Image (tube, rainbow, N blue to C red):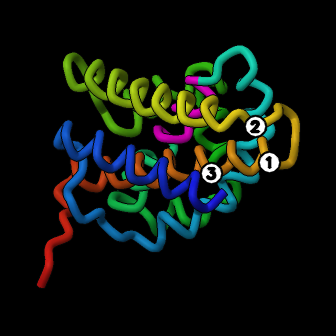
């Protein structure tokens, strides 16, 4: 599974770098990365339930969550870091189906072209990851399928955070 996740990382990095959404060197934000496991545990029951009929949403929503957590980190982390279930906090604002809109509108404060561009970029990332997952030819509903799905979510979360950090002006450069 490590090779699969590494392949996803490289593909998303190359794609998002070509779109000028991330830099060659990705930002590091341990606070956001440390929230991954807690968020994943809370998200997975909803994500798996939705995956069968809406795979792009099931995957793409995690990218939005990564963006939101990065935004929370930048604005009022002392408040948001103390929320027991940050995923449920976001989901329950408008429900699972509208979580993407909530994050774009109320967390990232996007409108117009910026709103639409982010929707398209996130959709393309989710589609790329779904395509890579399907090419693994993993038997559905197996332990291996579960771990592959979690690998997909992990990379989308990290790249969502990296995109948002980049959009907020955080850039990593060699010293």
Q: Residue furthest bottom?
A: 175
Q: Is residue 173 left or right of residue 61?
A: left
Magenta part of the chain: 56-64
> Which residue bears the numbered disc 2?
138
Circle 1 packing at 10 Å, graded few (<14), some (14-19), many (20+), is few
Give the residue drawn at x 82%, y 31%.
140
Marks 3/2 in contact by CB < 8 Å: the verdict is no
Q: Is residue 79 left or right of residue 58?
A: left
> Which residue bears the numbered disc 3?
151
**Could you say whether the residue bearing mark 3 is in a helix, strand or loop?**
helix
Residue 41 position, x and y percent, is 75, 53
Above/below status of 134 relative to 77: above
Marks 3/1 in contact by CB < 8 Å: the verdict is no
Residue 21 in the magenta stretch? The answer is: no
**Could you say whether the residue bearing mark 1 is in a helix, strand or loop?**
helix
> Which residue bears the numbered disc 1?
144
Q: Nearer the viewer, residue 167 or 125?
A: 125
**Prevailing SS of the magenta stretch:** helix
Q: Earlier in the sequence, mark 2 or mark 1?
A: 2
Marks 2/1 in contact by CB < 8 Å: the verdict is yes
Above/below status of 23 relative to 115: below
Q: CA distance from mark 3 to mark 1?
A: 10 Å
């Amino acid at each position: 599974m490590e090779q699969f996740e590494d392949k996803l990382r490289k593909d998303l990095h190359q794609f998002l770098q070509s779109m000028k959404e991330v830099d060659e060197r990705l930002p590091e934000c341990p606070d956001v990365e440390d929230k991954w496991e807690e968020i994943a545990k809370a998200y997975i029951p909803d994500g798996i339930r939705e995956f069968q009929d809406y795979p792009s949403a099931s995957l793409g929503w995690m990218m939005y969550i990564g963006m939101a957590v990065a935004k929370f980190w930048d604005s009022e982390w002392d408040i948001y870091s103390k929320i027991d279930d940050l995923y449920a906090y976001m989901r329950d604002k408008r429900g699972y189906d509208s979580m993407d809109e909530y994050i774009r509108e109320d967390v990232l404060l996007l409108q117009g072209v910026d709103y639409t561009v982010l929707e398209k970029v996130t959709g393309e990332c989710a589609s790329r990851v779904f395509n890579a997952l399907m090419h693994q030819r993993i038997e559905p509903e197996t332990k291996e399928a579960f771990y592959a799905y979690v690998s997909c979510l992990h990379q989308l979360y990290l790249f969502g955070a990296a995109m948002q950090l980049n959009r907020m002006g955080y850039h990593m450069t060699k010293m």
